Each structure stands twice: as structure tokens, then as C-alpha cells.
Amino acid sequence: MAEVKRGYVRPLDLKHGCVDLTHGSGGRSMVQLISELFARHLGNEYLGQGNDGAVLPAPTFNGRPGRLVMSTDSHVVSPLFFPGGDIGCLSVHGTVNDVAVMGATPLYLSAGFILEEGFPLGDLARIVESMARAATEAGVPVVTGDTKVVERGKGDGVFITTTGVGVLPDGLDLGGSRARPGDVILVSGSLGDHGVAIMSKRENLTFEATIESDTAALNGLIAAMLATGAGLRCLRDPTRGGLAATLNEIAGQSGVGMMLYEKAIPVKPVVAAACEFLGLDPLYVANEGKLVVICNALDAELLLNAMRAHPLGRDACFIGDVIADDHHFVQMTTTFGGKRIVDWLAGDQLPRIC
Amino acid sequence: MKYVDEFRDGELAQNLARSIAATVEPGRNYSFMEFCGGHTHAISRYGLSELLPPTVRMVHGPGCPVCVLPIGRVDLAIRLALEQGVILCTYGDTLRVPASDGLSLMKAKARGGDIRMVYSTTDALQIARDNPGREVVFFAIGFETTTPPTAVAIQLAAAEKLSNFSVLCCHVLTPSAISNILESPEVRQWGTVPLDGFIGPAHVSTVIGSRPYEFFAEEYRKPVVIAGFEPLDVMQAILMLVRQVNEGRAEVENEFARAVTRDGNLKAQDRVAEVFELRREFEWRGLSVVPYSALRIRQKYAGFDAERRFKLDYRSVPDNKACECGAILRGVKRPQDCKIFGTVCTPENPIGSCMVSSEGACAAHYSYGRYKDAA
């Protein structure tokens, strides 16, 4: 990443300019894009090394060597900008959360951009700025990156892949296979906000109240929970497929069943209304800043108090029990007093017809 | 949420459950068909069967729009998309209905067909306006609820002279399907499907009114209670049906009075009559060919009829041999009686149409109720 001398090159035209194929071809334009946009906003001592890879100190936890946790996530959201966020902050939050739910402290991120020829540079700048803000807020720097440009029609504006690395202290093991009958299920707040925000924008539906995505980095909330020393079994962020997919996954991995209580599951009225309208079930709608917690029943109150003391866990609550069940069904006692299965989603949620 | 929570109140449900339990006569079995997929969905989604006494059995009817769509009709739509290169627009659930050669509209889309999901016929019109160089076909399916919007779209297209828009009309009629079930040998002669009454359609009845059901009540001596799609509506309707049976009455009663009148929506009926006429016969999945059971576009609007415009030739395609959708749609069998239910045929890979929509009897039982079989 050699610096291009100012004065010889006109600065990037963020007002009218567009991504073109030269921005990915390894020439001056690419260097300019990297230095004026990516390095400018995301810059830090590791990214500034300017080599093919970032050299990072060996991670430690409280001064002792820990284990590495690594996770990767590609972001292809459409629309790129939505109420409450955009693909930039989403790509940071998504990966930070995937590392954090393992119980690890997220340390570094990488970012790979696939840009479509013709994409406005101004929009790209907004995305990168939002990414930088999210990374700063989460305290996780982007230490290495990559940019590719594909021809017009071969991408959808911008795709971003981020990879995160974190450090996990010895002795802490969270995972989907650790749920046991008798454990309880908690969530950190209302469900379905992100998916409905995206869907309403995509289908051009407007509601009286704007529905904002809940996209947020959960590492702060998780650190506060871990600090309580409570008996945590498993943490997950219920993204695609929503709460239903997450719990079915855990039930299968742990070989247990679950019983949810529909009355206890928090869904904002405006989200519930939009779901009614669109023919969706909020249990299957994606979240980007929520946490599903499986923990020892005795520690539930302790954890709920810690979660509620954090801004991202204010509405944390108990929603169900882990039970013994050879069929590993996730069941729910409905508001009506009946029972039903909360199954995996088959394909995409499609609106019913009448 | 206002106007929704009131109809899903758990305490009221328990009260109704107690009333039903107190009203059923000892030693008597009650078997009611809920005609609509919307009711099937509500029963499964809220676990209603657990609130009913064991002597009250609900039989799922054929009123799920995608379930009664025969393979041959979906094949026509797929051919339009893949061979004629049209933009094919349709409602969500239709995309997954299995067709010939292992295809569905969803799979045809992956093979390059320009197939788009729309929420309304006006979305399809807009796509036609935005793509003047392309043929845009709306694959119109559903009962009387979805028919008026299709009529309006055709009239708007005619008024705008939108010459690249047409409709593949597969609209079907509720009363014909009910007659077909009541006339079936299983109900009429053999009595293998005991039917003591019907929960009448909700949204369909807002359009056609309650009058069309009076014939069934009188002619076949079957009580009909028209009910809304909310779970409390269904519970209340069951209570009303039990009372009618106990008292030996066979009347049309309207539980859904907040939306349904005796005459229905006359404006909508006029629009439909203006644009559509009866088809002499139409193939239904499960009920086979039913005379005068569907609509086609009148000569006056022939230019907007995709069947005429693309000279489509309907070919009937038999269902998979192992699939019991036909018997399930007629109430003769239950989903769990089918050999391939939950094994070969799942919501991810539906063999029969009842496994497609959550309104379909098989998908509803698989997604919400199969814990009962496991017990």
C-alpha cells in the first residue's frame, strides 16, 4: 500500500464518482481508494503496517495465554441502508457477536469487500464510516482487508466478508451441546426487529412508527454477564431463522427438548403488527443485536439482573425451559393455552395467501 | 396489539373450552370440517385441538389455495417463464408448489426463469408498466378472496391499454368444492367420512356473503357456522356447531358478523362478474375434475387472458402415486395416514401440495402438531 503523492492525483470524487474496474486492478486507483477511504476511516497501527498481512501480538487473557476463537461471516444484505443501520455496521456487529457468544473477547477483524462496478463512491464512504464507528464502539479494530471489483451486474452493490479473532480464557466453555434438562432459556430483548426493518424497506411498506434494526455489538453485554460468574451453558445470537432456528439447533446439539411460553416472549407491538400484515412469524425473523442464553436455572435471576443493567439487555427476560425429550422438539405453550411445535423453517418464510 | 390480541385471549379460550366440554352430549361424536386453510392454520398454530373434548374431531377441508392447484396448472406457469421468457408474478406460497420434472416455480427461478413474488396484483401491474418491452403474466390463484383484486387489475390494464400484461387465471369457487365433498361417496353413501357440520370460510365469505351456504344447510341438512380466522373465532364456531347438532338444527349461522353480511361485498361481486365467467370444468388437486367450479376471463377481456394469448394447452398430470393429498383434501385420510408423510414428503421437499403452505393439512400437522404422533 504505497502512498500516492498528493497533488499528482485528484482526490476521490465522493460526490459523483463511482466504483470502476480500475479500483480493483492493483494500480494507482486502487491504492487511492484504499488510502483515501479504507485506511482513512478504519486506520489503526496494525492496518497501517501496510503489509500483506497484519502482525499481531499473541493474545492473552488477564495476562495468561488463552485459546483463540475465530469466526467469519459474509454480508449480502439488501437494501444496503436500512432503518437503524447499514451493511457497514452490520458486518462488524455480526462477526463481533459470533466471536463474543463463544465467551471470547473479540480482538481483531478483517474485512473483504466485493464492490460492483458503478457503485457510488459516496455510498461506499458512508458504509466504511459506519463500519469504522461500529468497530471503534465495539473496541475491535479492522487490522487487515481486501478489495475486489466485479463487473456491473455481477454483484449487488457491495458484499462484505468479515472475519473476527478473539481470545477465550481457559476453563470457560460455552456451546450448543451443553444445554441440560432443567436449564432455563433467556433472551436479551424484543425479537424480530432487524428482519422486519429490512422487510418493510424491501417491500416498500411504511408503518406509522418506523421499525429500526436492532443491530449492535454484544461483546459489552456478554462481558458483563460473564463477570457475574453465573453458570452459563450456551450463548447464541439468533440471526437468520430467528429464535426458532437457534433453539432447534441447540436442542439437536444437546439432545434435549425445549418448552417455550409464548406469553413470555417479547415482541414489540409494531413488529407484531408488521408480522401479522406480512404473514410472518416473529419467532423466525432475524435479529442482529439480541442474545439467547441457556443457563443453570439457579443463576437465572443473577444473569437477568446483570443483563438488565446493560443498555442492550434492558428488556431481558425468561422465555422457557430446557426439558428432556428424545425427539428434541422445541415446543411452545401458546397464549391460548394449547401446545405446538416451533419447528425449523422450511425454506424462506413466504407470505400465506389468504 | 389492538383488534388482534382480543381474539387470542387465553382466558376466554379456557372459558370457551369449558363451555364446549359442558355442551357436548356424552356418548356422542362430533365431526366438523373446517373448509379453509386459514382455519387449519389457526387450529394448529394455537394448539386448539388440545382444548377440545376428545369426542370433537376437526377434519381439514380443501380450502387451501395452493393445495388444490393441480400440477398441470403450475406446469403452464413454469412453461411461460422458461419457454416464453415472460416475467411471471405470483403470490408467495405458490412458488413452492411441486410441479412436473421435480420443478416448482422456485426451482424454475433458479434455472433462469424471471419469476417474482408479489404482495398484490397492483405490484404485478407496476412491473408491467416498468417493463414495456417484456410480457408480464400474473399467475392468479385462490378462492373468492383473491378474485376481485385480479378483476380490478384486468380492468385497470384495459383502461390503461397495458398491452404487455395478462393473467393466467386459476381462480376457483368455494361452493362448488363444498358440494363436491358433500356429494362424494365417502360422505353420502358409505359414511366413511362422518361430517356433522362445517366451519364456513372467513375471508371468502366477506366477498360472497353467507347466503350461498344456505343451500348446503337446507339440502344436505348440515349446519354451517361462518367464522373468522382468529383462534377464538374458531372456538366460538365449534361451540355453535355443537349446539346446532344437539338441537337437531341445520342452519347457517354467522360468527364472523364483524366482517360478513348475508349479501357480501356487492361491489366486488360486480367486478368479478364483469371480468370473469364460469369455466365448464376445472381440475382440482384432490377433487379431480369438478364441473363449473372455476372462473375464466370473459371474451371482452380476451387480450388479457394468458391462456389465449400464449395458446396454452392444459395437460392433466397425475399426482405422485404414494401421495395421499387427494384423500386428505377430501377429509378421507389424515396427514399421518400417508406413508410418505414426514419421511419422503417434508416441508423442505414437498411431494404433495398439502405439504407446501402452512395452511395445508400436512404442513400444518408437520410444523405444529407432530409431537402428538411421537408421544
Image: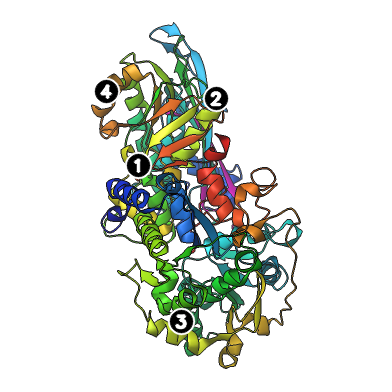
**Magenta stretch in the rendered image:** A139-158
Q: Residue at x 49, y 55 (%)?
A: B58
Q: How many other residues sit within 10 Å of disc 1, few (<14), some (14-19) or many (≥20)?
A: many
Q: Amino acid at mark 3?
A: Val
Which mark is nearer the camera, 4 or 3? 3
Chain-order first, disc 1 or disc 2: 1
The label number, if any, that marks residue A306 in the structure image: 4
Dividing the picture into quadrants, the one containing residue B231 is bottom left
Q: Residue at x 63, y 69 (%)?
A: B184
Query: Does residue B296 appear to the left or right of A261 in the view shown?
Result: right
Q: Amino acid at mark 1?
A: Asp
Tell me the distance, in whole angstroms, between the alpha carbons under discs 4 and 3: 56 Å
Q: Which residue is mark 2?
A: A255
The label number, if any, that marks residue A214 in the structure image: 1
Q: Amino acid at mark 2?
A: Gly
Tell me the distance, in whole angstroms, between the alpha carbons under discs 1 and 2: 31 Å
Q: Is residue A326 among what the camera can see?
A: yes
Tell me the distance, in whole angstroms, between the alpha carbons under discs 3 and 2: 53 Å
- Above or below, A332 against A139 in this view is below
Query: Which chain is disc 2 placed on?
Result: A
